[in-house]
Image (cartoon, grey):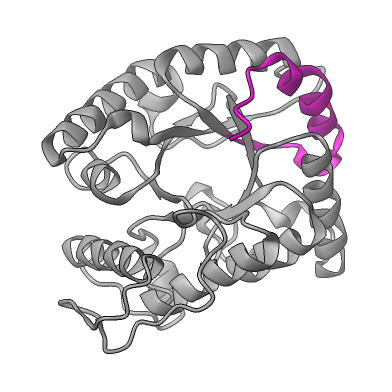
Amino acid sequence: MRIGLQVTDLGRLVSPADFGKKLTEIARTADDMEFFSFWVPDHLLNAMSVFGQPIDAPILEGYSTISYLAALTQRIKVGLQVTCPLFRHPAVLVKTVSTIDVLSGGRAYLGIGAGWFEREAKGLGIAFPSKRERFERLEETLQIAKHMWTGNTRPFGGKYYQLSEPINSPQPLSQPHPPILIGGEGEKKTLRLVAKYANACNIRIGSPLEESPASSGETRTKPFDLLRRKLEILGQHCKDVGRSYADIEKTVQAFISLSPNTQDATRVIELCRQLAKVGVQHIIFNISNVYEITPLEIMGAQVIPKLPINSE
């Protein structure tokens, strides 16, 4: 079982002058506590505004952030949960992830989705096409990543993107390339793209904590039923495209808090074990009180050592 950390909600910090220091402390502590991965969102405006937070709450650009944090850590993998392909040309995205992977010693993920936050795109003058087109662009982006990461320099001609000379040098250190994680649980499109292109899926299961957001009421009340259904559908897509279901890392995103008045280490361990029984291999926790640092130390001392950690 791999344990990851997603950090959001910079608004809990006093001022931008604190951001670098606190994120450094969080990332280094997570690294020391043997978290497997570290993730930040890919938003340019505050997506938590859909839950009532201010749209202008502070947000850092994702790839700049994980580049900074990768340089300050030793072993933890880094990625965006998840990249919006509307923000960057696919070739630039591939080059960016390749660069982070090379400079970090092979520690990059490409987390990616179709994009969903229309207000953010329109607010900053970024084209926000129909849902159908967003998924078509996502698929072309995945095709370009595979094309460039195999060293194929022949021209790529797609519906939306044309690359006459798709050179990517240096290539990533991760072999065969940085793992591609596709976030989302759409049964017809997203999970099929996982089966065709990805090394990992990510399904958001929400949280039993009332103060934490969940993607739907169903994830809060029946997370395991939801997860089983989504993974069964992913398995069928794998059969349809001739892919081994076992090749895909099953990851989930969950919201927790660790303090005497909320979830304690025993409950988190039990949650991890329940998820492992369903087939989950990598849990990415969004810890609501992560800025206190103590929750990371609890995870490192009381949770992670008691779980089977996959060190591959």
**Viewer can see residue 114:** yes
Q: Residue at x 31, y 68 (%)?
A: 147
Query: Foreground: 235 or 168?
Result: 168
Q: Quadrant of the C terminus?
A: top right
Q: Residue at x 78, y 51 (%)?
A: 74
| Horizontal side of residue 61 vs 278, given as left or right | right
Q: What x and y, as percent, mark residue 271?
A: 57, 15
Q: Residue at x 59, y 24 (%)?
A: 209
Q: What x and y, as percent, mark residue 17?
A: 86, 69
Span colored in magenta: 284-312
Say if the magenta span includes residue 107.
no
Which picture quadrant has residue 299? top right
Q: What x and y, as percent, mark residue 93?
A: 46, 72
Query: Foreground: 278 or 209?
Result: 278
Say if the magenta span includes residue 291.
yes
Query: As displayed, is residue 218 above or below residue 140?
Result: above
